[in-house]
Amino acid sequence: MRRFLCAALAVLLLFLSAGCSGPSAKDAPAVRELFAMDTYMTLTCYGENAEEALDAAEAEIRRLDALLSTGSPDSEVSRLNRDGGGELSEDTLALVKAALAAYEDTGGAFDITVLPLMELWGFPSGALHVPSDEELAQALAVTGSGRLSLGGNILSLEPGTEIDLGGIAKGYASARLMDLFRSFGVEHAIVSLGGNVQCLGAKPDGSLWRCGIRDPEAEKADELAGILTVRDTAVITSGPYERKLTDPDTGQAYHHILDPSTGRPADTGLASVTIVSADGALADALSTACFVMGPEKAEAFWRERPETFDMILILADGSMLVTEGIAGAFSSSRSFTVIRE
Ligand code: ADP
Ligand code: MG
């Protein structure tokens, strides 16, 4: 009885010290929804400065979008593409460095010089064009990050080469948001930038965030292949269900993740790749790269650096492979195979 009274008193004190708003208002998340970087985003954050942090986060996303968008002629990336290079701002420099490192690491599977190929296929405009072999050969001739050179903060592009940071920008942005939230004293936050998730800390009650992994075969985004519980990490998925263009004559669909060695949409038997890593930009680059590599190469790639990231591969036949670092945190109604070192 005495213990109960003490506990009741403690709770009462907690109420009083929290002021008129009370603990429930304090613990309620602040949520912001927006459309940027060509996708829907949801930002959720807890704590005293949550609203101010969300204002700053939204401004930061819009700033990065204006810097990196290939669709806007005024962006820094468009200027670089037009001028064959030039001086890079701090963010673009960090992104290009990360992209070049990923190009080296992945044997060219991640390659930001895919823009001429993306344009050839009609992805930016949405008007599909299935290219001829000759057209592909022409675009491939100006593809390859070996055609980029970075000296200090000056990037040079060989003639005809153009960059597209779309395969890494959202992961970079979500990582920037985590830094920004920290600077506002926020300890618990989660953002979803078009299904690409990054979280700060755990939930305010100490439990882990539950991150749904979409079933790539399902029509709707809320049909899940499984749930991953996480804290302080990025969970980034690449899957062709995101953006597909369909040929009205043949019914054939083409997706936006290109194999830089063929110039065609990567066709490796994968339906989606989810990368889990504390480094958001790396997770984003690797989700695209592992999709291009296909299951066997992606598995071998992970075995060479199991400390760097974990992944969930969903194959076109519905089977799932999960690396051992996150296997215990993944739950699914379907069976899955654990990839071990
Ligand atoms: P999403 O942006 O749909 O979440 P990804 O992160 O996989 O998916 O990025 C796909 C985008 O990356 C494409 O829209 C294109 O801009 C760019 N891209 C396509 N293929 C590659 C590639 N092999 N390497 C780097 N970037 C790519
Ligand atoms: Mg990516």
Image (cartoon, helix red, strand yellow):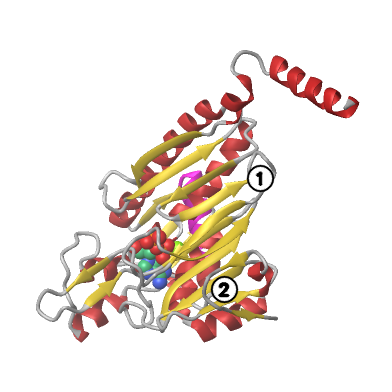
- Badge 1 vs badge 2, beta-carbon distance below 8 Å: no
Magenta residues?
88-100
The foreground one among 145 and 266 is: 266
Residue 163 visible, this angle: no
Q: Residues within 10 Å of mark 1 (few under 14, many from 20)?
A: some
The percent coordinates of residue 57 (x first, y second) are: 48, 36
Q: Residue at x 50, y 53 (%)?
A: 197
Q: CA distance from mark 1 to mark 2?
A: 29 Å
Q: Is residue 16 left or right of residue 39?
A: right
Q: How many marks?
A: 2
Callout 2 secondary element = helix
Task: Name the residue beneath numbered marker 1.
Answer: 201
Q: Does label 1 or label 2 sit earlier along the sequence? A: 2
- Judged from this view, the residue extending furthest toward the left is 249
Which label is found at residue 216?
none
The foreground one among 168 and 10 is: 10
Residue 61 painted magenta: no
Q: Residue at x 57, y 54 (%)?
A: 210
Q: Is residue 219 left or right of residue 222?
A: left
The foreground one among 157 and 73 is: 73
Image position of 276 with respect to 337: above or below: above
The percent coordinates of residue 73 (x first, y second) are: 25, 47
Which image quadrant for residue 182?
A: top right
Image position of 107 with respect to 17: above or below: below
Image quadrant holding the N terminus, namely: top right
Q: Residue at x 58, y 34 (%)?
A: 46
Q: Look at the magenta stretch and give its main secondary structure.
A: helix
The percent coordinates of residue 299 (x first, y second) are: 58, 81
Image quarter for ligand 1 equals bottom left
The percent coordinates of residue 338 (x first, y second) are: 63, 79
